[in-house]
Amino acid sequence: MAGLRAAVGLADSCDVAVVSRVHPLRSHSVAAQGGINAALGNHPEGRDDSLDRHAFDTIKGSDYQADQPAVELMCQEAAPVVYEMEHWGVPFSRFPDGRIAQRPFGGGAFPRTCYAADRTGHVLLHTLYEQAVRKRVKIYDDCHVLRLVASDGRVSGLGALHMPTGKVVGFSAKAVIMATGGYGRVYLRSTNALINTGAGIALAYRAGVPIKDLEFVQFHPTSLYGTNILITEGARGEGGYLINRAGERFMECYAPGAMELAPRDIVARSIQTEINEGRGFQDEYVLLDLRHLGAEKIKSRLPGIREICIDFSGVDPIEAPIPIQPGQHYSMGGIDVDQDCRSPVPGLYAAGECACVSVHGANRLGGNSLLETIVFGKVTSEKLPPDLETLPTAEPEAVEAAVKEIEQDLACLSDSRRDGIPYTAIRDRLREVMSEKVGLFRTREGLEQAVAILKELKEGVKRVVVPGGAPNRRFHQGLINAFEVGLMVDLGEIIVAGALRREESRGSHFRTDFPHRDDARWLHHTMASWTPDGPSFSTKPVVITKYQPQARTY
Amino acid sequence: MGSQEYTFLVFRFDPERDREPRFDSYTLQLDEWQSVLGALMEIQDRLDPSLSFRYSCRGAVCGSCSLSINGSLALACKTLLFRLPGGTITVEPLPNLEIQKDLAVNLQPFWKAYQEIQPWLHTAGVLPEKEYQVSERERSRIDQFVNCILCACCYGACPAIGRDSDYLGPAALAKLFRFVGDVRDRREESLLRTLDDQHGVWGCDTVFRCIDACPKEVRPTDGIAALRRSLIASRFGRRR
């Protein structure tokens, strides 16, 4: 979504192209359900809402880890981008007065989440794609980017495997915008699309761009038991209850004020605590009960999740509660960029989930991710064109060299060496370790074990192969999977090491051995840079302007 | 949740290398709540990494994994094994489209038809300062068409496409109605008239195959019928 928004903004002034592993309409943004935040004040209970309040809620939600000027920028741009998207055709749900409907979401003081039933991501993505078609944006889909070409402080382009031909191709460009989403599939249980391997973040890392705050991993409280498909926070925004095996609305014990609408980190940990302490079902899940909302409200406001529940778990939420468990959902961290979406490498920009501006800090509020993609996609499209005048020209030789390197890598992966390790062996073990030891609750002991296992996996990556080789590279997804497993291990390594370093609990990062926030020691961003021996870490201050850190209660 | 043995007969073909398509057979133990997409991923991961098919969300919203499963067009991610009769499942690519490799088809004609209807909101005059005022009733009129995920199941099912590859097909025409039916849209009527022929709104056989094939309960034929009505009305000088 961020990439499309950037491309739409750039189409009139630049020679821009979208390079994507899938057709743009198949991107993970399409799966976003609940809505997009903007303090429009359309809701009768939201008349007193304001930019400042939206910014404060976001900053408090971030556990004071967000950079406050960036948050203010996002909140300022919220209403204009929502109106722009509406003018472009987004069919938002409406209030009786004809204005865009808004619903309450976790961590927000007012109902400010604009929605289109529970298919908000779908309508936003389709509308942006429509604008891209209108502007005749060039799109290269079925293209798996395998190298970001950056050297000597400049970006020169990309190297990619073009699936329909099986050929490695190069793209020369003065500027590259990464808009590649999150890394959910590094975890076993994730709400993310299957394509969300985090490859873009890892490619930037390997190209020498610092990666920021990767230890902050959001677990969504309500993913459907079995498939971990997202069940929107909107279900609780509309009034849904979380219930344990004893039939109790257990959020009363954890967040008596906000109840089910506490921020995601708090609700997810509460659910996991209930399950861990034996008050869940089959030690796996609790229930999300919507029955009291009534059939009509469920059908009109939550038709998509009703369909998902019926199709994937055989449960109709009108008649029975939904079995849910926390699942990896979102990456607060990512490619280090400033609020103009510039990374420290000239010519490299990033926007959306793969980027870390940082507007979400240690915990993102629901409804702020769609907002971030569109606002910062737009920001990139405005900030990038003037930079083109001073950016050095791309080096086609560097791109050609990258193409050759990719050829070698792919040849290596399809080699039938005797000591080869199938990519699945590494990938499956990685997911297991990340879920078990780098999940909602973390400890030094568990993280140290994870470090050791990841070290082994990284050794294994050197011998990874596609079983049977890949004599024909056309649409050979096994080959891509084998390539990406190395990238996924790189990300795992950064997440684990960052989590081990951070001896405190802040937002989504919870250390049972350090259960409190420690601003004196840890109120700063974690910066990871690639070295041959693994990530090297440094820090960067969090920008605090208007809102001094306070205790975070709901 | 029970586990059982399933056999998949999967269509295999690389037009650049193979003379003829073939069916490869894979047998594996799977949970009955597994989806056909999940099964294909298992086959790719454990048995044959060279098997090609498209996928993304696995939650029936992205529209990537449209396939023919036991002869019916469906999203593989949404088709759970226990809902299929018997333990043998035949998986083939979408019909009406050129095969790129195995289950992956070339969707270019589908996207070209989509682009031909100018699929964006055509506005005219000064934009409102905030949002357009739209009632829920007006919005809900286009709801089912908004829900279209452009998976192309209807395109694969359409007999008119099979006959006339220049016919725009159900998805593009349903999308056109999504805009024509939107109270904010101000497209010129002349745009509509360019589609007033057998390759456009009159190409439909009204045999409702698209409705049967749609995994999202969109009824493209309803949109096509409504477009026909408004075209006839405009011939008699009435604004839609």
Image (tube, coloured by chain):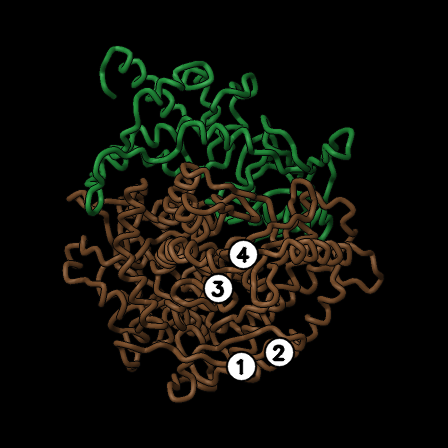
Chain colours: A brown, B green
Amino acid type at image mark 1: Leu
What residue sits right under mark 4 in the picture? A196
Label 4 resides on the chain identified as: A
Tag 1 secondary structure: helix
Return the disc, 4 or 2, that comes first in the chain's sequence.
4
- Give A220 or A243, whichever is nearer the viewer: A220
Return the disc, 2 or 1, that comes first in the chain's sequence.
2
Identified at 42% across, 46% down, the residue is A13
Checking the image for residue A500, the label placed there is 1
What residue sits right under mark 3 in the picture? A328
Q: Position of residue A252 (x, y in %)?
A: 29, 72
Callout 3 and callout 2 share a chain: yes
Label 4 Cα neighbours within 10 Å, binned few <14 / some 14-19 / many ≥20: many
Callout 1 and callout 4 share a chain: yes
Identified at 32% across, 62% down, the residue is A74
- Distance of label 4 from label 3 (alpha carbons): 12 Å
Do the residues under discs 3 and 2 have CB atoms within 8 angstroms?
no
Mark closer to the observer (1, 3): 1
